[in-house]
């Protein structure tokens, strides 16, 4: 691999990982109520000259803003590198969407501090999830991760299916109180599952023999997005019912996708022997 390609791959991977971490940091910041810790000011805080935090809660909010700024520049750098290197058109379009949504996300982040209304909190998270998805797709298509032999579809689907157990167990309103640490764990598992099904959908796309798995994986990604967003809503009977319905549907969809994959892999292995006979 040429040195320039090596550097780009590392930048792309670091940007995806940084965005993943930023999503979790945003969840934790909201969970501990640190959004209002800087005297409800943005972009200033409550410490020295309004530039630095004065206590732990305001440090959490200040640190979240700092990481968001760094990751934002990383996304911009990845987009510029992709454009400069003449990557595929779909990669450029996906990363352009991520970059185009950054100003919107910054505005929504400010509104979560200045007004702290639930509508802005939900929109802030939803936009972050769209940016993460667009970034992930752009990076995958730029670096050909979906062609990597190390990305085994059975392992991706199987691992995601196994994670549904702790994910549903930690669903808001089920068995545990959603403390900040529990929320962090819940969203960490959910985002890992989301990443797995997106990778599966991309890896199986464009292959006629696996088109069903592509659509099932894409459907699983939508269901996970709904559940993760539902976690930001005020818990009502309707929200809880829809959340559980999405969870059980997710199990069925992942199980069918894994069954289809295993069945087709088994039939492909048997085909040569049947031809010999």
Image (spheres, rainbow, N blue to C red):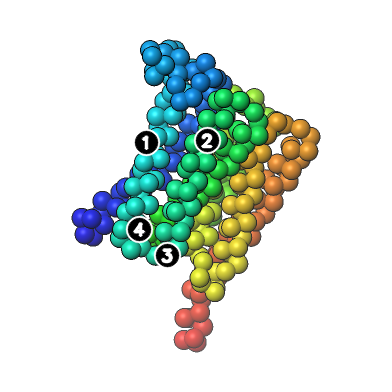
CA gap, disc 4 to disc 2? 26 Å
Up/down of 81 relative to 260, above or below: above
Per the rendering, the mark at residue 89 is 3
In the drawing, does residue 70 fall left or right of residue 154?
A: left
Give percent across and percent down for residue 42: 49, 24
Tell me the SS state at disc 1: helix
Q: Helix, strand, or loop for circle 3?
A: helix
Q: Is 184 left or right of 1, judged from the image as shown?
A: right
Q: Position of residue 3 (x, y in %)?
A: 20, 55
Residue at figure coordinates x 52%, y 16% from the top left:
39
Depth check: 230 or 193 in front?
A: 230
Task: Give the residue at x 55% y 69%.
Answer: 210
Q: Could you give the CA–CA distance between mark 1 and mark 3, rounded to whole angstroms?
A: 26 Å
Q: Which residue is mark 1?
A: 70
Reading the image, the residue beneath label 4 is 83
N-term-proximal mark, 4 vs 2? 4
Q: Residues within 10 Å of mark 1 (few under 14, many from 20)?
A: some
Q: Earlier in the sequence, mark 4 or mark 3?
A: 4
Is 110 displayed left or right of 240 in the figure?
left
Q: Is mark 4 in CB contact (under 8 Å) with mark 3?
A: no
The answer to which of marks 2 and 3 sits earlier in the sequence is: 3
- Residue occupying the point 49% across, 36% down: 106
Which residue position is annotated with label 2? Answer: 107
The tag earlier along the polypeptide, 1 or 3, is 1
Closer mark to the observer between disc 1 and disc 4 = 4
């Amino acid at each position: 691999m040429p040195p320039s390609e090596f550097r780009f791959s590392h930048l792309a991977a670091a940007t995806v990982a940084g965005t993943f971490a930023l999503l979790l940091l945003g969840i934790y910041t909201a969970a501990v109520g640190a959004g209002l810790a800087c005297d409800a000011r943005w972009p200033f805080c409550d410490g020295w000259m309004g530039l630095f935090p004065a206590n732990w809660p305001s440090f959490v909010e200040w640190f979240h803003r700092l990481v968001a700024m760094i990751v934002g520049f990383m996304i911009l750098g990845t987009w510029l590198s992709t454009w400069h290197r003449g990557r595929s058109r779909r990669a450029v379009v996906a990363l352009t969407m991520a970059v185009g949504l950054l100003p919107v996300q910054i505005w929504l982040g400010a509104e979560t501090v200045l007004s702290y209304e639930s509508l802005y909190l939900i929109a802030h998270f939803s936009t972050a999830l769209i940016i993460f998805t667009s970034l992930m797709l752009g990076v995958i298509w730029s670096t050909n991760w979906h062609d990597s032999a190390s990305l085994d579809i059975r392992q991706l689907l199987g691992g995601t299916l196994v994670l549904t157990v702790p994910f549903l167990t930690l669903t808001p309103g089920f068995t545990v109180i959603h403390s900040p640490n529990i929320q962090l764990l819940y969203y960490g598992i959910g985002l890992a599952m989301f990443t797995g099904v997106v990778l599966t959908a991309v890896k199986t796309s464009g292959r006629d023999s696996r088109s069903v798995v592509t659509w099932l994986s894409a459907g699983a990604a939508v269901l996970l997005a709904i559940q993760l967003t539902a976690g930001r809503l005020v818990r009502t009977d309707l929200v809880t019912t829809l959340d559980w319905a999405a969870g059980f549907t997710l199990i069925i969809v992942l199980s069918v996708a894994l069954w289809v994959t295993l069945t087709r892999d088994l039939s492909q292995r048997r085909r040569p022997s049947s031809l010999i006979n």
